[in-house]
Amino acid sequence: MSGLRAAVVGGGIIGTAVARHLACHHGADVTLLEKEDHVGAHQTGHNSGVVHAGLYYEPGSLKATLCRRGVDLLQEFVTQHDIAYDECGKVVVALEEAEVGRLEAIHARAVANGVPDVAMVDADGLRALEPHAVGVRALHSPHTAIVDYPAMTRALADELVAAGGSLRLGQAVTTLDERGTGVRVGTALEEAEFDVVIVCGGLQSDRLAALLGEPRDPRIVPFFGDYFLVPERQRSLVRGMVYPVPDPRYPFLGVHLTPRVDGALMLGPNAFLSLGRESYRPRRVVPRDVLDAVGFAGFWRFAAGNVAAAVRESRTAVSPRRFVAEAQRYVPELDGVGVTRGPRGVRAQAMDSSGRLVDDFVITGTDRVVLVRNAPSPGATSALAIAEHVVAEALGRRSGSR
Ligand SMILES: Cc1cc2nc3c(=O)[nH]c(=O)nc-3n(C[C@H](O)[C@H](O)[C@H](O)COP(=O)(O)OP(=O)(O)OC[C@H]3O[C@@H](n4cnc5c(N)ncnc54)[C@H](O)[C@@H]3O)c2cc1C
């Protein structure tokens, strides 16, 4: 042991990866505190399961660099731990000429980000890759993959414990108090002092920052994403993932067709304001979460600038038929018969007071505390690289403060 006492708050894939990195690579004495009764309970356990290759992100951004590094580390980890992983590839499809310029811009970004083997294909090339998909052009990313993120998170937690770390489930952190000598972390059951604390609270990250006396903004505004499941008889309509060309004004990728490692085929997710940060059923409203969103001036500025997108997304939110219709534009043989409602996920999307959705990962902190304040997609893909990055940041801040 290095003698460093570290606490990590939040047992999603990022917090668990951070805790395991501190214990396994730095010999720290680590306590991981998670409020739920298992790791990966929120975003980590409710996402598309895609290992993004790094197509979309601004070159040089944290997303671009940590996604590429994250893919390499993830591949090594899942191979070592025999976790389900399938490099089924992905096509991003332009339905009309008007979208081709945007698709070419994504191609240029992918090349700049060092994504291997990406290529533009025409309608025939698309048909050769995905015989049931239609479009005028497509960007093919053969190494985009799917994985079991909850299994990966459990394996990270097992490594943490094997390295002597402590995993405290069912322990919500309620106080964070930084003093000259350390940081006191409190739950309803106990309070203890640590040399460094790393907070990876996902949907609660702005509230956890406020516990420490840090600014509430950027604020977390929760956007849910519903998935629908295609019946078995139509699962073979796609070989890999089929995505639309994303709307550049919006950080979400649009309803896509994604195979899962268990053999299911999902449609989704859409994106609409969630009435609860951790609500996975349509009618479950959490008044505190709603008040937080509607009482935030940035939210109204965002809403005013995104009326068209909100109307489009609200159609898919209320009508499964409209949802399936979105996917049918790319795979017309999808008949919608027997499509069933699948899981819902809620994205922790940071928004600034001007109503701008913060695109890149945001990592801030004080002398002894590092806060992961915005880690949306490709956060799961990048988790092992985010862990390296924030641990280096935490150790650097601490040595700078001594
Ligand atoms: C619908 C959807 C689709 C997505 N698709 C993909 C994808 O295909 N590929 C990809 O790479 N990324 C995807 N993402 C993003 C990815 O899921 C996230 O980037 C990633 O899971 C973030 O991990 P995390 O650990 O920060 O957050 P979470 O998994 O949300 O974990 C945060 C944890 O903190 C805990 N916590 C909060 N407050 C406290 C407290 N006070 N005390 C103790 N514990 C606390 C929570 O209980 C939770 O377990 C998607 C996200 C969503 C929602």
Image (cartoon, grey):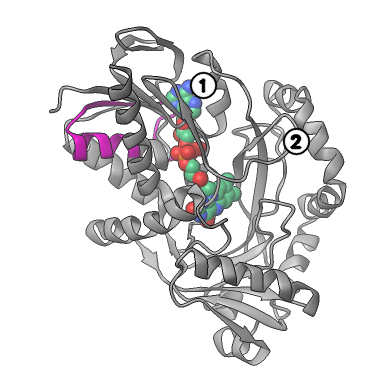
- Which quadrant of the figure contains the C terminus? top left
| Nearer-the-camera pick, 387 or 232 | 387
x and y, in percent, of residue 103 in the image = 67, 72
- Asked if residue 24 lies in the magenta stretch, the reply is yes
Crowd class of label 2 (few under 14; some 14 to 19; many from 20; radius 10 Å): many
Q: Which residue is mark 2?
A: 355
Q: Is residue 231 visible?
A: no
| Nearer-the-camera pick, 180 or 127 | 180
Q: Which residue is mark 1?
A: 208
Mark 1 CB near ligand 1 (8 Å cut): yes
Image side of residue 115 versus residue 99, left or right: left
Which residue lies at the image location 72% right of the left edge and 39% below the top edge?
A: 356
Pointers 2 and 1 in contact (CB under 8 A)?
Answer: no
Mark 2 vs mark 1: give the one in front.
2
| Nearer-the-camera pick, 399 or 278 | 399
- Asked if residue 28 lies in the magenta stretch, the reply is yes
Q: Which residues are magenta?
A: 18-42
Mark pair 2, 1: CA separation: 21 Å
Q: Amino acid at mark 1?
A: Leu
Image side of residue 43 versus residue 280, left or right: left
x and y, in percent, of residue 317 in the image = 77, 50
